[in-house]
Image: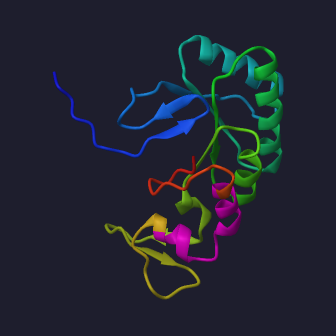
């Protein structure tokens, strides 16, 4: 069977390349409390030893984002170099902090703005705006509810903003 993959931009996450020019990567998300460092490290090790090439953690707040630094440090101290990914929802400040410690920050910009999705359409009505916006990416880049300046600063630090709703 010859599977045709859509051509995508390749990005480097730690020592792992992601994109259509590379194999599909195995990843898993920890289900521990991110603030429980020991449990999170132990679960990450189990995930890595099971074959994962990326390990994801949720960082819903500042404390969890800071905990990622301790998790990262402990995994490296134990000899594991697998890239870590922070899953961020609703908190741009957590994204900025997490980016200091992990190899990838995954965000959904639609969660960062005050908006409601209109039924049966791809248009958003932003609560402080009268005009509809057609995509999450436009919401990310054109409205004030998401402070994009810190994200631009991360871009200058070697991260890039991708249109597919991730920050790598």
Q: Is residue 13 above or below residue 27?
A: below
Q: Give the camera-side residue of 64 and 9.
A: 9
The magenta stretch spans residue 139: yes
Q: Position of residue 142 (x, y in %)?
A: 54, 76
**Residue at figure coordinates x 36%, y 45% from the top left:** 8
Q: Answer with left or right where residue 161 lies relative to residue 67.
A: left
The coloring applied to the image is rainbow
Q: Main secondary structure of the magenta part?
A: helix
Q: Answer with left or right where residue 59 lies relative to residue 133.
A: right
Q: Answer with left or right where residue 11 lies relative to residue 35.
A: left
| Residue bounds of the magenta highlight | 138-155
Q: Position of residue 30 (x, y in %)?
A: 64, 28
Farthest residue to the bottom: give it.
Answer: 130
Q: Quadrant of the N terminus?
A: top left
Q: Within the image, what quadrant is residue 52 found in?
A: top right
Q: Give the camera-side residue of 75 and 50.
A: 75
Q: Within the image, what quadrant is residue 145 found in?
A: bottom right
Q: Position of residue 76 (x, y in %)?
A: 77, 22
**Residue at figure coordinates x 57%, y 77% from the top left:** 143
Q: Give the camera-side residue of 38 and 121.
A: 38
The answer to whether residue 147 shows anywhere in this view is no
**Residue at figure coordinates x 75%, y 58% from the top left:** 93
Farthest residue to the top: give it.
Answer: 49
Q: Position of residue 67 (x, y in %)?
A: 81, 37
Q: Give the camera-side residue of 44 and 128.
A: 44
The answer to whether residue 112 shows anywhere in this view is yes
The magenta stretch spans residue 85: no
**Number of marks drawn:** 0
Q: Is residue 98 above or below residue 80?
A: below
């Amino acid at each position: 069977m010859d599977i045709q993959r859509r051509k995508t931009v390749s990005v480097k996450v730690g020592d792992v390349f992601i994109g259509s020019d590379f194999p599909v990567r195995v990843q898993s998300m920890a289900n521990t409390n991110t603030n429980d460092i020991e449990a999170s490290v132990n679960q990450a090790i189990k995930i890595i030893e099971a074959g994962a090439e990326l390990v994801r953690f949720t960082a819903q707040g500042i404390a969890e984002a800071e905990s990622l630094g301790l998790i990262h440090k402990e995994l490296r101290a134990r000899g594991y170099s697998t890239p870590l990914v922070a899953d961020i929802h609703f908190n741009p400040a957590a994204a900025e902090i997490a980016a200091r410690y992990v190899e990838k920050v995954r965000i959904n910009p639609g969660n960062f703005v005050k908006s409601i999705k209109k039924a049966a359409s791809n248009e958003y009505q932003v609560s402080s705006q009268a005009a509809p916006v057609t995509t999450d990416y436009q919401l990310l880049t054109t409205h004030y509810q998401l402070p994009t300046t810190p994200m631009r600063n991360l871009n200058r630090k070697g991260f890039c903003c991708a249109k597919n709703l991730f920050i790598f």
